[in-house]
Image (spheres, grey):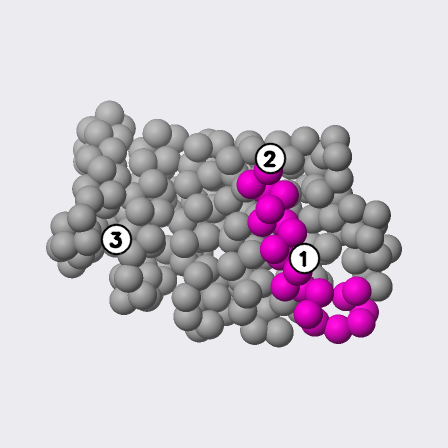
Amino acid sequence: GASAGTQGKAAGALANLAAGSEDLTARFASAGAIEVLVALLKPGAGASAGTQEQAAVALKNLAAGSEERKARIASTGAIEVLVALLKPGAGASAGAQEQAAWALKNLAYGSEERKAKIASAGAIEALVALLKPGAGASAGTQEQAAWALAGLASGSEDLRDRIASAGAIEVLVPLLKPGAGASAGTQLQAAWVLKNLSRLNADIGDRMESAGAIEV
């Protein structure tokens, strides 16, 4: 097999190609690049932290494209692999986690079917966990996690209910308070999630009030 250094350079080259023109990225995806990238991110693949991060960057870039390409990415098992990188014990670097959350954010915008698939893979719980105090997630990772939740919260009532049930309200409201240490980007996306959740029902409003949303 290829050495870790060779894999890392190859993944970096793939990340650069995936950020190219729409025509180039379409050809890139058609050549089987998505499957290669997903394989590099699987547990047990033996990829270095740098290789994982570059593979996640490439998937993030590809996931910023057309609905057709997003659907293709979702069909390769990428969602499950990306969610796994966000979980404690995955051993992923801060950079890889941020890029994985970013890729999920890109995938979370679009079809309801894909949103449901992301939720079914355990993404909601993983994203909420990254936003908890003491989670140790970087500012960049937290911002992308909040943005991914905002994308999911723009979906069906069932998805919004699942986000609320995962404890998102109690985690997001404190992020809006002065001194929380959250970035402006994280606060903006947290506010969007809460705005979408507030459309659910009176019980959600009561929970927001209990969490201190009115004071914020």
Marks 3/2 in contact by CB < 8 Å: the verdict is no
Main SS type for the magenta part? helix
Classed neighbour count for the residue bearing mark 1: other residues with Cα under 10 Å, few (<14), some (14–19), many (≥20): many
Which numbered disc flags the more N-terminal residue, 3 or 2? 3
Marks 1/2 in contact by CB < 8 Å: the verdict is no
Q: Is residue 4 left or right of residue 96?
A: left
Check residue 34 in the rendering and tell me which mark sits there, or answer none: 3
Mark 1 residue type: Leu
Classify mark 3: helix, strand or loop.
helix
Which numbered disc flags the more N-terminal residue, 1 or 3? 3
Q: Is residue 86 magenta?
A: no
Classed neighbour count for the residue bearing mark 2: other residues with Cα under 10 Å, few (<14), some (14–19), many (≥20): some
Q: Position of residue 42 (x, y in %)?
A: 37, 47
Quadrant where the N terminus lies? Answer: top left
Classed neighbour count for the residue bearing mark 3: other residues with Cα under 10 Å, few (<14), some (14–19), many (≥20): many
Mark 2 residue type: Ser
Q: Position of residue 73 (x, y in %)?
A: 31, 59
State which region is magenta.
183-205
Residue at coordinates 37% horizontally, 55% vertically from top-left? 78
Classify mark 1: helix, strand or loop.
helix
Check residue 183 in the rendering and tell me which mark sits there, or answer none: 2
Residue at coordinates 66% horizontally, 60% vertically from top-left? 195
Q: Position of residue 2 (x, y in %)?
A: 19, 33
Residue 91 visible (yes or no):
no
Residue at coordinates 70% horizontally, 42% vertically from top-left? 175
Residue where numbered disc 1 is placed = 194
